[in-house]
Amino acid sequence: MVRALSRISGCILAALCLSLLLGTQGRADAREAPAAEPPGTGPAMSGTVPLSRFSAEPGPLRLRDVSDSADLFIPVASTARVVDATVQLRYTHSIALVPHRSYLAVRLNDVTVAQAPLNPQQPERSLSVRLPADLWRPGYNKLTLAAVQHYADRCEDPKSPELWTELDLSRSYLTFRLRPLGRPYTLADLGGLFSPGLGGHGQVLLLTAPDDERLRSVALPLVAQALALRRQYAPLLIRHAVWREPPTGLSGYQPEGEGLPPAHVLVGTVDQLRRVLPEESLEAVSGPYVAIAGEGETVRLIVTGRDEEEVVSAARGLAEMDDGVNPGRWVSFRARTVSDPGRPLVRRQFLEPNSTYSFDQLGVQTTTVTGE
């Protein structure tokens, strides 16, 4: 049993019950050609990140003994899929190794995708390995780096200090290309859109009307907190601007003095939003209301209501709602009841103070360890 004390940065929200009205063999290696891109799914997103980003330990990764391995967990947003990925490894190994019995293996989600001999004549190496798109999945993907190391054909010490391979994670990189989902987003996608994984939005712009100071001081912090919670352990860059209204009779909006980023949120009363949005996008507003629009790299949230109090209630509902039970593009909050103010809001994600948990409750599987 484990006694855990939860340390939660920021505000701990009250646990709430919400009544919601829902709106509407051959694995490839680095030399093979990239996978064909699926048609009609929007522009590809690409990037390169060091593998050290996925390691909890600073410095190089050292594999020791006759057989050793280490796992790096790479998150991918549920709103994106990998179409191509390559890992570039930089490593150094012992010059005492026997090359025909020593090798480095790379596995993705327990499937071996590459092997490279550890040659003492070339102790400093660079290895490029393509990670097949069909092995990736939403959520955390396990990249395993495993070494089998021998310094003799027989009668060797399996824990000899001569058996080592060192990977420089700060100079090893993952290069990837993603494609977003080929459909319009729903509120159920919010957690994925702001996921800490590859493809998640790391910044957002909050837009308000130029004539409303109260919403900026009350509603905006709630909206910011709502999106930051979905970002989990990763930072979220949040900026604010007032929108520039179009000439009378036209709809549209732009932030003052800057362009419109891929992820943005409009916060205001329905009367304020009518000055920048077409009427049909607001016709369902009959109380505290949150809506989502967009696909590909672009996503827009609307947080509104018939008056300022309803806008604040909508912002609070955005922070408290369970995305998974909202498969539509909009939601109207009809009631809000506090069940127990002393309990954390996101109970499933945090351990409660002064509580006892079994390893099974923490998701740790039973493991049998044997040895000499």
Image: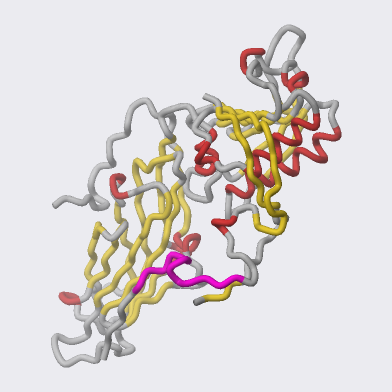
Q: Is residue 259 visible?
A: no
Locate residue 197, reporting x and y percent: 49, 50
Q: Would you say 252 lies left or right of 244 here?
A: left
Identify the main secondary structure in magenta.
loop
* In the rendered image, the vertical position of residue 77 relative to residue 314, given as above or below: below
Of 194 and 130, nearer the camera is: 194
Q: Quadrant of residue 142?
A: bottom left
Q: Quadrant of residue 207?
A: top right
Q: Is-magenta flag for residue 120?
A: no
Tell me which residue sits at (42%, 68%) in the image.
364
Of 30 and 11, nearer the camera is: 11
* In the rendered image, the vertical position of residue 245 relative to residue 48, given as above or below: above
Q: Would you say 353 lies left or right of 213 here?
A: left
Which image quarter holds the C terminus? bottom left
Q: Is residue 302 visible?
A: yes
Locate residue 33, reporting x and y percent: 25, 42
Of 331 and 93, nearer the camera is: 331
Tell me which residue sits at (24%, 60%) in the image.
112
* In the rendered image, the vertical position of residue 39 relative to residue 339, given as above or below: above
- Residue interval drawn in magenta: 355-366
Of 344 and 167, nearer the camera is: 344
Locate residue 10, reporting x and y percent: 71, 57
Q: Quadrant of residue 287?
A: top right
* In the rendered image, the vertical position of residue 211 relative to residue 142, given as above or below: above
Locate residue 200, reporting x and y percent: 52, 44
Tell me which residue sits at (33%, 72%) in the image.
69
